[in-house]
């Protein structure tokens, strides 16, 4: 369908998350969740077919809920599966169904509208009562209502992103990290979403797949139409609908400059990340999938600083077995040996939901059942992973990293399970590296405040600034409405980083940074000046970070850090930091077309 072709150029502004410029046909996946379904008056002869449509949606939702209940029962047990019994009861409630049916027949309205009206009346009434049990039923009805409306809207038949017919720019209200991981790079020119922030996992995934991407466009989905022509600028966070010849010309020039820069950066692939005055930094890369191994080798990284193992668990109904994990971990560890590979244990939850566990809805998922909290309860899953990582450590280049540690107890408990696994492997005569190092992600402010105690029980720290920023500043990393407050240069964050590094140094352990901050050229001198030993960044970002380090003096970086530690506002930090990078490596900031 050719749409929007009659209007001129129009610019939609969002948040740049994965560099690159691309242009092509748009494919809009969905228009986002409607607040309230549209009311449509039916023709007289339509009532019967509308009722059949409603009945079919109920049947499909029932089937969907039974499937989920069965999987949850298998994976998590009967107690967790009970919630879906409650949902099924809602679907079978004769009063509710009767009321919707009558509304469709008597008021001649469409099924979506009738169902939404009736369920809203129920939830409103239930949420006002004092009884906790009944208030929870309101949440059940809300959940079921969304599923039924989804089926009525045909949302279960979503576009198959793995098998697109022609290359296009995908536009969606939201994309889950698991779906992003499966995008076909040859068919997806770029993608953009209404929601999301710079460090949402969808954005991070786009970066490592080298697919240009923009998030946080707010309502582009509603305004863009499948078939229209657009340019996606992943450097500046723009979608330009119907770009003019002048715009295309300017972007052509920009793209050539970027390509030249990338080519020049290839020359330092095998050189170390060392400052002009001799400070050596370990520069490693973040990966999400085994297939990223080639990219790690190609970008000149010194191993893997963060392997997000949870991607092996996404988009499947059951957890991968120990053997399956072992084969995957061993593959990348062997390919990169003797360079280190740091496997972070499962950080499932928050915006990364896997199979059976996605049925467990939470009000505040980022503050909920995530990462080490999940693993310390689901010990069978955790132990299978620990055993697999241990077994993959025979080349002595594997390290382990626990995510979301908030206190010493969690670390002790995790290490107890690790010791159990080691003992089992010894009994089974399965080899592993007895000296395997264990590190801690520092990504919760409480961990920073007790870094002194944690440092005595760990071999290294890895600063997870993506989460540390959101938990310190109370800013949801996924929410585009508060994205302007998600501030890596906030004076509070700089102080927390310094406290962590100092605690590490005091106890003789190294500190790295594996959050997106490590790949932001403007912030790298600051991190170096604060004293980090390692930076781990997505492979596409690595050559330019190395180039920057090789053009910096550590003495200047330390001066910058000293002034930042006294700054009261992030703008003061950023102005100085940018000026330093601009002086040291001017080419890195040439990413804007002249006319915009
Ligand atoms: C972080 O929080 O900075 C991090 C690297 O982990 P993730 O982005 O997977 O939460
Ligand atoms: Mg994190």
Image (cartoon, rainbow, N blue to C red):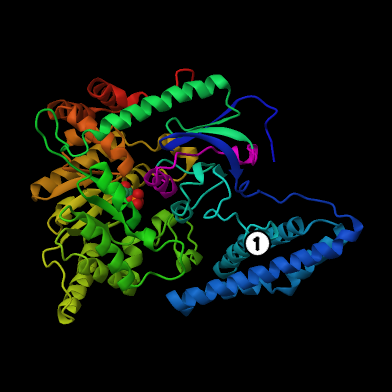
In terms of depth relative to the viewer, which is nearer, 543 or 197?
Answer: 543
| Residue position for label 1 | 145
State which quarter of the image contains the N terminus. Answer: top right
Q: Position of residue 277 (x, y in %)?
A: 9, 28
Q: Position of residue 47 (x, y in %)?
A: 86, 62
Q: Residue furthest bottom?
A: 427
Q: Residue at x 69, y 50 (%)?
A: 36
**Picture quadrant of residue 526:** top left
Q: Secondary structure at mark 1?
A: helix
Figure check: 271 above or below 302? above
**Picture quadrant of residue 58:** bottom right
Q: Residue at x 48, y 77 (%)?
A: 73
Q: Position of residue 317 (x, y in %)?
A: 47, 69
Q: Which residues are magenta?
A: 199-227
Taking the image as shown, residue 559 lies to the left or right of residue 514, namely left
In terms of depth relative to the viewer, which is nearer, 408 or 233?
Answer: 233
Q: Residues within 10 Å of mark 1 (few under 14, many from 20)?
A: many
In terms of depth relative to the viewer, which is nearer, 15 or 118?
Answer: 15
Report whether the residue tagged 1 is closer than 8 Å to ligand 1: no
Taking the image as shown, residue 5 lies to the left or right of residue 484, namely right
The stretch drawn in magenta includes residue 200:
yes
The stretch drawn in magenta includes residue 389:
no
């Amino acid at each position: 369908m050719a749409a929007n072709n009659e209007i001129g150029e129009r610019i939609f502004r969002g948040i740049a998350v994965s560099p690159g410029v691309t242009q092509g046909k748009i494919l809009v996946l969905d228009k986002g969740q409607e607040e309230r379904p549209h009311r449509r008056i039916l023709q007289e002869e339509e009532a019967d077919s509308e009722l059949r449509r409603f009945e079919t949606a109920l049947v499909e939702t029932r089937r969907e809920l039974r499937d989920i209940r069965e999987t949850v029962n298998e994976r998590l047990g009967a107690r967790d599966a009970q919630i879906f019994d409650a949902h099924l009861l809602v679907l079978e409630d004769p009063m509710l169904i009767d009321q919707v049916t009558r509304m469709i027949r008597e008021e001649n309205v469409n099924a979506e509208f009738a169902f939404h009206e009736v369920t809203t009346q129920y939830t409103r009434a239930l949420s006002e009562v004092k009884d906790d049990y009944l208030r929870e039923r309101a949440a059940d009805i809300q959940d079921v209502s969304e599923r039924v409306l989804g089926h009525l809207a045909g949302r279960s038949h979503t576009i198959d992103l793995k098998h697109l017919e022609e290359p296009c720019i995908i536009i969606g209200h939201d994309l889950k990290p698991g779906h992003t991981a499966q995008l076909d790079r040859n068919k997806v020119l770029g993608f953009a979403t209404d929601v999301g922030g710079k460090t949402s996992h969808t954005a991070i995934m786009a970066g490592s797949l080298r697919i240009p991407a923009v998030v946080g466009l707010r309502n582009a989905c509603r305004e863009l139409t499948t078939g229209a022509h657009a340019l996606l600028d992943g450097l500046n966070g723009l979608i330009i609908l119907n770009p003019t010849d002048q715009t295309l010309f300017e972007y052509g020039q920009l793209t050539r400059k970027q390509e030249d820069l990338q080519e020049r950066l290839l020359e330092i692939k095998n050189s170390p990340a060392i400052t002009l005055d001799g400070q050596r930094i370990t520069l490693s890369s973040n990966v999400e999938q085994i297939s990223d191994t080639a990219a790690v080798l190609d970008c000149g990284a010194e191993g893997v600083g963060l392997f997000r193992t949870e991607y092996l668990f996404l988009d499947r109904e059951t957890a991968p077995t120990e053997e399956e994990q072992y084969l995957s971990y061993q593959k990348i560890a062997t390919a990169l040996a003797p360079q280190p590979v740091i496997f972070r244990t499962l950080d499932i939850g928050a915006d990364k939901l896997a199979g059976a566990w996605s049925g467990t809805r939470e009000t505040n998922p980022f503050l909920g059942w995530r990462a080490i909290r999940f693993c310390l309860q689901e010990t069978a899953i955790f132990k299978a992973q620990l055993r697999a990582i241990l077994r993959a450590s025979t080349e002595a280049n594997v390290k382990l990293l626990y995510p979301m540690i908030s206190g010493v107890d969690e670390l002790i408990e995790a290490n107890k399970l690790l010791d159990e696994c080691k003992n089992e492997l010894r009994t089974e005569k399965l080899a592993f590296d007895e000296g395997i190092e264990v590190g801690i992600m520092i990504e919760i402010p409480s961990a920073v405040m007790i870094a002194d105690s944690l440092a005595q029980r760990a071999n290294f720290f890895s600063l997870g600034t993506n989460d540390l920023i959101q938990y310190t500043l109370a800013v949801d990393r996924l929410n585009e409405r508060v994205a302007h407050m998600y501030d890596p240069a906030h004076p509070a964050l700089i102080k927390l980083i310094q406290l962590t590094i100092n605690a590490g140094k005091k106890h003789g352990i190294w500190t790295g940074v594996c959050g997106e901050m490590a790949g932001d050229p403007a912030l790298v001198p600051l991190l170096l000046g604060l004293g980090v030993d390692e930076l781990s960044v997505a492979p596409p970002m690595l050559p330019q970070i190395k180039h920057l380090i090789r053009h910096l003096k550590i003495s200047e970086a330390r001066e910058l850090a000293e002034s930042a530690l006294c700054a009261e506002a992030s703008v003061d930090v950023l102005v100085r930091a940018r000026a330093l990078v601009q002086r040291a490596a001017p080419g890195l900031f040439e990413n804007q077309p002249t006319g915009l």
